[in-house]
Image (cartoon, rainbow, N blue to C red):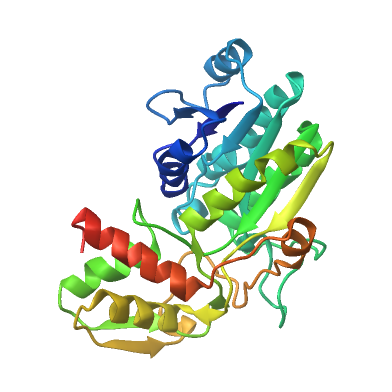
């Protein structure tokens, strides 16, 4: 099976790269912006028209949530226009596109986990562009899987775990928001789930949306406390409220995703975020980054 993974140098793309060797029946082509600028329509169309593939796994995205408030056109291009184009190119070959979205498509005012059927109402530019990306996939794809996830972390790239560890090593006390609830997602667990379920996803003849994050619920403060504890770094962490730490983009106050649909349909087990965090910390230590 020929699989193209875009955004291959991001944290999720690198997990697909590492895990890919475990799937001998899958033949991967990994591309990033240095290989192909996906915002260049002419080059992108030419590449995908001449390249054989049965699956596109689209990990490419604009993820700078606060910068998106000022760079809305750049965010819209990567998060909506590009996915729509990839979906159209996949449809032309009868191929499947797998696309990743976010809890930020919701307003965060719900008091219990969001399901795939809940109406979207983004409250930031980033969330709005990701929501538009979902709409483009549904409009352009013949076979597609949209996976909404949240609070992604890994040993790679820029994410909350690596940021907390870097700041903790500087020796200064940390102040972390405690009134935003959600569930961390280990990029390795997400990538492994996609590769394991790929044969089932390929049987779909429409566009389906699923939620996937790790099990458990927490807030950024308790997440940071666990990161510090598992790392062994001595650092004081205190809690603050959202109003004490203003940001350009508004965050959903509650962003827990229900995994009932994907769990019931495919019978999968989902690791708890604390267990996955321990694994991530261990990998960082093995890499010499801790």
Residue nearest the viewer, comparing 181 with 147: 147
Q: 96 above or below 110?
A: above
Q: How many labels does the image show?
A: 0
Q: Where is residue 285 in the image (x, y as percent from the top left)?
A: 23, 62
Q: Position of residue 82 (x, y in %)?
A: 60, 33
Placement of the C terminus among the 4 image quadrants: bottom left
Q: 86 above or below 123?
A: above
Q: Which residue lies furthest to the left in this view?
A: 171
Q: Can residue 82 be seen in this view?
A: no
Placement of the N terminus among the 4 image quadrants: top right
Q: 143 above or below 223?
A: above
Residue at the image point whose x is 75% and y is 19% from the top:
92
Residue at the image point whose x is 75% and y is 25% from the top:
91
Q: Is residue 276 visible?
A: yes
Is residue 127 left or right of 141 when viewed as pictured?
left
Residue nearest the viewer, comparing 129 with 288: 288
Residue at the image point whose x is 30% and y is 70% from the top:
164
Is residue 273 left or right of 287 when viewed as pictured?
right
Residue nearest the viewer, comparing 196 with 248: 196
Q: Where is residue 256 in the image (x, y as percent from the top left)?
A: 63, 73
Query: Which quarter of the picture shows residue 141?
Result: top right
Residue at the image point whose x is 44% and y is 75% from the top:
246
């Amino acid at each position: 099976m020929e699989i193209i993974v875009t955004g291959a140098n991001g944290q999720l793309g690198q997990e697909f790269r590492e895990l890919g060797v475990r799937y001998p029946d899958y033949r991967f082509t990994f591309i990033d912006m240095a290989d192909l600028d996906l915002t260049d329509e002419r080059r992108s169309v030419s590449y995908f028209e001449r390249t054989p593939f049965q699956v596109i796994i689209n990990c490419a995205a604009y993820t700078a949530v606060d910068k998106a408030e000022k760079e809305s056109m750049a965010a819209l291009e990567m998060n909506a226009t590009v996915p729509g184009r990839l979906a159209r190119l996949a449809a032309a070959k009868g191929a499947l596109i797998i696309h990743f979205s976010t809890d930020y498509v919701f307003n965060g005012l719900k008091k219990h986990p969001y399901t795939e059927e809940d109406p979207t109402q983004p409250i930031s530019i980033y969330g709005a562009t990701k929501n538009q990306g979902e709409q483009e996939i549904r409009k352009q794809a013949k076979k597609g899987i949209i996976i909404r996830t949240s609070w992604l972390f890994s040993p790679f790239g820029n994410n909350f775990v690596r940021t907390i560890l870097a700041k903790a090593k500087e020796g200064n006390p940390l102040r972390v928001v405690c009134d935003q609830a959600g569930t961390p997602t280990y990029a390795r667990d997400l990538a492994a789930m996609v590769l394991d379920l790929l044969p089932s996803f390929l049987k779909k003849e429409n566009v389906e949306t699923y939620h996937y994050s790790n099990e458990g619920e927490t807030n950024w403060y308790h997440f940071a406390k666990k990161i510090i504890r598992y790392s062994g770094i001595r650092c004081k962490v205190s809690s603050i409220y959202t109003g004490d730490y203003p940001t350009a983009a508004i965050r959903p106050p509650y962003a827990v995703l229900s995994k009932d649909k994907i769990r019931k349909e495919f019978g999968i087990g989902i690791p708890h975020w604390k267990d996955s965090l321990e694994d991530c910390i261990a990998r960082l230590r093995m890499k010499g980054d801790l």
